[in-house]
Image (spheres, rainbow, N blue to C red):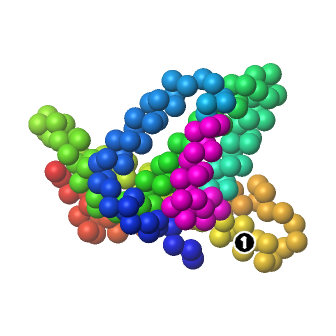
Amino acid sequence: MVSLMIHRRWIRAMPAGAKLAALALISIALFLVQDPLILAVVLAATLALLAHLRALFLLRTLRPVGIMLLLAFAAHLFLGDWQLGLVVVLRVAVLVLLATIVTASTALSEMLVVLDRLLAPLRWAGLSTRPVSVAIVMTLRFVPLLAARWQGLSEAWRARSPRRPTWRLVTPFILTALDDADHAATALAARGAFARR
């Protein structure tokens, strides 16, 4: 399996807090932008960043996301609002790519430390913040991993059948994703990841 980590030194050296803060600010800014031309420029800049990081291989793992975006655009086109559909697709594409860059260049333990600090005020109210931190980190981390799982199922299908897989992969994908989630939860519980903090 191809490694999903980005090994360019400068981005790995950036503090996890800085990367997550930048991702949050860019996300807010993107939802304020309604011009598809501006969003297209931002998408091009994001792809250029991926190329600079020598991480264009991540695009292969995000193919299922691309399919869903095309379906979303087709739905907007059918409803007669293609411009809104284009805005939505471009916005989500940028956000997914940026989130993938952050997760592929940041250790899970570093993100947990940052989120624990951000959620610290909730502990004053007696709430356990570690499960929330783990859930956020695992959601970000599982996006490229689930995409890689879909790619693996597609390759296995093509090796056994001349027909295109399309919807036939949905059921095994969901079952394997649930199995992966169950194994991950068991492993995290065994390591005390959900211990009260």
Q: Is residue 41 magenta?
A: yes
Q: Quadrant of residue 185?
A: bottom left
Residue 91 located left or right of residue 169: left
Q: Is residue 156 visible?
A: yes
Q: Which residues are magenta?
A: 40-60
Which amino acid, mark 1? Glu
Circle 1 — which element?
A: helix
Tell me if residue 56 comes above or below residue 68 in the rendering: below
Q: Position of residue 25 (x, y in %)?
A: 40, 35
Residue 104 located left or right of residue 76: left
Q: Quadrant of residue 76?
A: top right
Residue in the image at 76% along x and 27% along y:
82
Query: 88 and 132: which one is in front?
Result: 88
Query: 14 and 82: which one is in front?
Result: 14
* Total numbered labels placed on residues in the image: 1
Q: Is residue 145 visible?
A: no
Q: Is residue 54 magenta?
A: yes
Tell me if residue 145 comes above or below residue 129 in the rendering: below
Q: Position of residue 62 (x, y in %)?
A: 62, 56
In the picture, the quarter occupied by the N terminus is: bottom right
Tell me if residue 181 comes above or below residue 81 in the rendering: below
> Badge 1: few (under 14), some or many (20 or more) residues near its Cα, within 10 Å?
few
Query: 144 and 98: which one is in front?
Result: 98
Identify the residue under disc 1.
Answer: 155
Residue in the image at 29% along x and 54% along y:
15
Residue 141 located left or right of residue 190: right
Main secondary-structure element of the magenta-colored stretch? helix
Residue in the image at 58% along x and 39% along y:
42
Q: Check the image and name the residue furthest to the right.
A: 162
Residue in the image at 48% along x and 55% along y:
101
